Amino acid sequence: MNSFVFLGAPGAGKGTLAKVLTGMFNIPHISTGDIFRYHLKEKTELGLEAEEYIKNGQLVPDSLTCDMVRARLAEDDCRNGFILDGFPRTVNQADELTAMLNEQNKTLSAVILLEAPEEVIVRRLSGRRVCTGCGATYNLYGKMPLHDHRCDQCGGEVVQRDDDKEETVRKRLMVYEEKTKPLISYYKEKNMLIEMENLDDPKDVAKRLVDILAK
Ligand code: AMP
């Protein structure tokens, strides 16, 4: 089973790298942030419950988040593996993840910590633009759509995420420091952590990671 958790601050490049690896391993990329954004857009019950937390850069309560992940991992496409991007984000979620994997007879191959200097993170987040249609990401300081604010892939509108605005970004980084960083020692102690600097082209980083995993 190829099953990975991507750990790292917002803007560390988890989503971008996950998109490369999902194709290489043919396993689903499960981004809890993307799933929540889907529920927000569709105004589902879960979306309405999660909305205020997300808008304020806070974590959605563990119970809601864990139920959502448990159901997603039980889906058929997760049989041979998965990439969890943005989950777990608290020690309690990590304990819950262990429990749900046990329930479902699944194991975790590795936890990959992606690191980048703070100035790179702030630049990535403040420059990030996303397609409201298909979720493709662009960046003011990198690749932007060929036609003004229209996604190259689906023609959807390309906008800044509300929670990528400066004040919310600062809050999200504080929440990461306080609630998520303890997971680094948590997984280190379990000998599951692979630490990687994520500054190069995502395809090169993915290749480096595959080499490490092969060892
Ligand atoms: P992301 O796209 O991963 O940065 O997530 C966007 C937002 O969704 C976060 O700022 C949280 O409000 C919420 N969220 C995503 N994943 C989780 C999680 N594992 N636990 C709680 N809230 C989450």
Image (tube, rainbow, N blue to C red):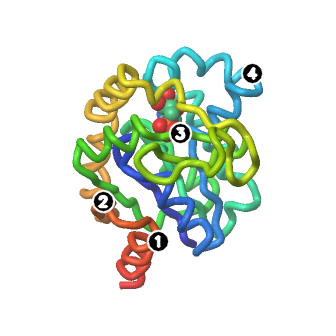
**Residue at image x 50%, y 52%?**
15
Left or right position of 125 against 191 = right
Mark 3 or 4, closer to the camera: 3
**Residue at image x 47%, y 46%?**
139
Report the residue that reaches farthest toward the bottom.
215
Mark 1 or 3, closer to the camera: 3
Mark 4 or 1, closer to the camera: 1
Q: Earlier in the sequence, mark 3 or mark 4?
A: 4
Residue labelled with disc 1 = 203
**Label pair 4/2, CB-CB below 8 angstroms:** no
Above or below residue 61? Residue 119 is: below
Q: Amino acid at mark 2?
A: Lys
Q: CA distance from mark 4 to mark 2?
A: 39 Å
**Residue at image x 73%, y 40%?**
156
Residue labelled with disc 3 = 129
How packed is label 1: few (under 14 Cα within 10 Å), some, or many (20 or more)?
Answer: some
How packed is label 4: few (under 14 Cα within 10 Å), some, or many (20 or more)?
Answer: few
Above or below residue 4? Residue 46 is: above
Residue labelled with disc 4 = 43
